Image: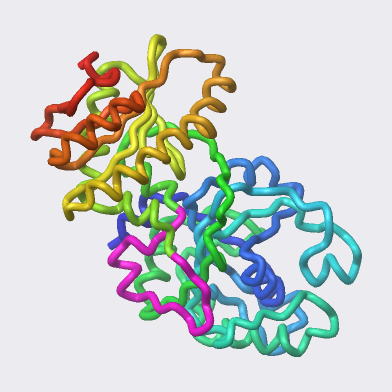
Amino acid sequence: MIPDFINKKKLYKFTGPPENWVTAIKFMTWGLEEKYRNQWKNIMPGDIFLMHSTSTNTRVEGAISAVIGFGIVGINPTIKNTPLWLEEIEKNINKWPLLVPFSEIYLFSPYFENNIIPEPAKNNISEITAVSLEILKNSRRLSTIKGFPQMGSFSSVKPEVVAQIFSGITKLFVIGQESISSDYIPTPLLKLDDVRDQNRYGTTLQNLDVVKSKTFTAKGSNYSKDPVLLERAERAHQTTLEKLMNIFKEAGYNTYFNKHVDLFATKEDKSFLFEVKSNENKNFLPQVRKGVVQLFEYEYFEIKKFQIENKTKNIIFKNLAFSTQPTNIEYANFMNTLNLGVCYFEKNNLKSIGKQVGTNFL
């Protein structure tokens, strides 16, 4: 049986010697050659990649050809112009300029317990070798994986191959970014045709029980979960978003989302920006305060950029949508003074509290 999260993702394998994987883990990125530029452009946040470590063309004695883990593609791919990997540094070349950022890595071995990852340098070969052998300990040899694509350093992988590897693993050791960046980094809006698309592009798997049941955080890891993506995983949040999306699609709107924006619906004459909040646990005020900032922030950084790129100037109505009816009417009225709407669903009917902000088109 193939887990849903595998079926919803695009799947790849990256291939390289173990010393390159040590550097990739250290800097949470992988590099591709220039010849893969067209394919590199199509790699999206949330895609899954298998980490194939080779037994050839390596400095590591005792290396085997095996899958050492898998990872999740993060946001903001970049192009480097200086050496990063050991071979590049020694030859002073830029062999792998196209960088693929990682948001999470799941290794099959506990790896370096103190989280000390050696720099890619010739005088660190012994340390690099030690770490390489550690992450190879519980790896899956290629000879045991049916259907694994063995040609090329980068290729797509069939879902049944990833499911085969995942089902045979009992422990996953998660590594993530050392900290969540405090910088606001706008990301392109993506077409939202199904609420499950948000999982397709989600850059964490920590909201999935099938993954959490196997996951351990290695000692010394500074892994931190993404609160936005975990919030989106809540059932109430998903249900509310799906109802909103269906209403606007039936009304002929194009619907979008990204890492920040829950729902942006747009048509010729007007657009709607929604931040969806679950208030199942009587947390209305904290959710409202956070949501107010998010709506203005997303409008300024994300939506204005989208309108410029698409040459549209239609009016934007900003709304907070709750999973249940809020009881604090006075705070809803306060939001109205900021020209923000407050709405919720009564069964499948969208209701507004206080002054309606644009949603009266329904």
| Image quarter of residue 38 | top right
**In screen coordinates, is 210 left or right of 75?**
left
Colour mapping: rainbow
86 and 335: which is toward the camera:
335
Q: Residue at x 66, y 75 (%)?
A: 22
Above or below residue 347? Residue 114 is below
| Image quarter of residue 264 | top left
Q: Quadrant of the C terminus?
A: top left
**In screen coordinates, is 352 left or right of 121?**
left
Residue 214 located within the stretch drawn in magenta:
yes
Q: Which residues are magenta?
A: 203-224
User: Can see residue 56?
Assistant: yes
Percent position of residue 320, x then y = 29, 35
Percent position of residue 100, x then y = 63, 54
Name of the residue lying farthest toward the top: 269
User: Can see residue 142?
Assistant: no
| Image quarter of residue 120 | bottom right
Predominant SS of the magenta segment: loop
Q: Quadrant of the N terminus?
A: bottom left
Q: Residue at x 54, y 34 (%)?
A: 301
Residue 61 located within the stretch drawn in magenta:
no
110 and 66: which is toward the camera:
110
Above or below residue 345? Residue 30 is below
